[in-house]
Image: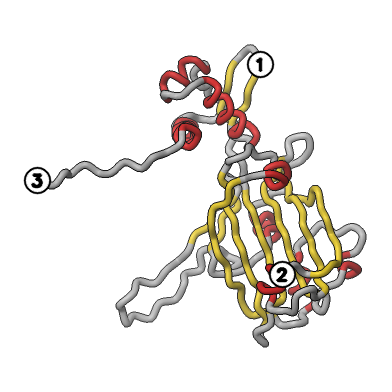
């Protein structure tokens, strides 16, 4: 009996299919070029006009498409992309300054409170320990064209950072503040990278459609004495962040040094 050489097809939702198809279509058009009319495009992609319209709205909110009523839909100028390796921990503000991208803090909730059971476990402290919670939306660009690019949450034991340390006009990075304080001396970050579906308040904060896929980084910042200084959750809108990792080939005895990919690393 002959084995079939056909690959098993992965089942995709219509929404995911049209998102991938639209992304590919946009990548093959130059800035300012017009896309086909909706009826033609929906037929070309094999989806309903309602599904196409919802997907196009998502790309429009990301700044990748521009709709001109009565005229058509055009490919927008690509937004600046923050690209970085994961070998060196740097704040979003530092990375943005490097490429000249203007970012600032939007909606923010800053408070001292008791740690939730999950936060206490991640920080390796007793349940109910006092922590400083800093949750905010980061926006890129200048008004009226600014766009939410990330939703960041930092949970820090008050032994390391208090609300008064942020001041009344805090618009920066918790990581940069901890580095500036110099106490405790920081060592490294343990980070998990995963996909997260935008839902509820997260979707509202980032102006995303429910079901859009976000890039999520969940991290624990570790001091040189082994204490967890910061537990953070970072959600990024696709199209604004690009991460890469330099990895050594296993099974070799060659000494390898991570190349200096960027001047500041």
Q: Which mark is residue 2?
A: 3
The picture places residue 185, in percent across and down from the top left corner, at 71, 82
Q: Position of residue 38 (x, y in %)?
A: 52, 18
Colour scheme in the image?
secondary structure
Provide the residue designation for mark 2. Answer: 117
How many other residues sit within 10 Å of disc 3, few (<14), some (14-19) or many (≥20)? Answer: few
Q: Give the x, y percent position of residue 80.
A: 61, 45
Identify the element where label 1 is drawn.
Answer: loop
The image quarter containing residue 24 is top left
Cα gap from disc 1 to disc 3, whole angstroms: 56 Å
Say above or below: 183 vs 4: below
Give me the residue at 79% from left, 61% from top: 134
Residue at disc 3, secondary structure = loop
Q: Rate crowding at label 1 as few (under 14), some (14 to 19) or many (20 or more) other CA atoms within 10 Å.
A: few
In the image: residue 207, left or right of residue 10: right
Work out whether mark 2 precedes mark 1 in sequence or the reverse, and give the earlier one. Answer: 1
Q: Which mark is residue 69?
A: 1
Q: Earlier in the sequence, mark 1 or mark 3?
A: 3
User: Is residue 39 depicted above or below 187 in this figure?
Assistant: above
- The Cα–Cα distance between marks 2 and 1, rounded to whole angstroms, is 50 Å
**Viewed as shown, does residue 142 lie left or right of 234?**
right
Q: Tag 2's secondary structure?
A: helix
Q: Nearer the viewer, residue 25 or 259?
A: 25
- Nearer to us of marks 2 and 1 is 2
Q: Report which quarter residue 115 is drawn in.
A: bottom right
Q: Earlier in the sequence, mark 2 or mark 3?
A: 3
Q: Are marks 2 and 1 in contact (CB under 8 Å)?
A: no
């Amino acid at each position: 009996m002959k084995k079939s050489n056909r690959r098993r097809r992965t089942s995709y939702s219509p929404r995911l299919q049209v998102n991938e198809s639209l992304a590919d279509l946009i990548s093959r058009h130059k800035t300012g070029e017009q896309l086909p009319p909706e009826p033609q495009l929906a037929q070309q992609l094999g989806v309903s006009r309602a599904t196409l319209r919802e997907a196009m709205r998502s790309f429009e909110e990301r700044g990748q498409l521009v709709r001109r009523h009565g005229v058509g839909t055009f490919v927008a100028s690509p937004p600046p992309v923050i690209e970085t390796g994961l070998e060196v921990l740097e704040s979003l503000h530092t990375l943005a300054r490097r490429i000249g991208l203007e970012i600032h803090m939007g909606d923010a909730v800053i408070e001292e409170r008791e740690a939730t059971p999950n936060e206490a476990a991640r920080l390796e402290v007793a349940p109910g320990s006092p922590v400083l919670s800093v949750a905010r939306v980061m926006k890129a660009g200048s008004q009226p064209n600014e766009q939410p690019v990330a939703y960041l949450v930092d949970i820090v034991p008050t032994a390391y950072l208090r609300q008064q340390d942020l001041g009344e006009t805090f618009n920066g990075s918790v990581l940069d503040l901890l580095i500036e304080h110099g106490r405790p001396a920081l060592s490294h970050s343990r980070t998990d990278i995963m996909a997260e579906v935008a839902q509820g308040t997260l979707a509202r904060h980032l102006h995303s459609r429910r079901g859009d896929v976000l890039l999520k980084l969940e991290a624990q910042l570790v001091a040189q004495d082994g204490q967890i200084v910061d537990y953070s959750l970072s959600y990024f809108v696709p199209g604004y962040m690009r991460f890469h990792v330099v990895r050594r080939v296993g099974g070799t005895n060659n000494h390898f040094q991570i190349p200096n990919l960027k001047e500041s690393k």
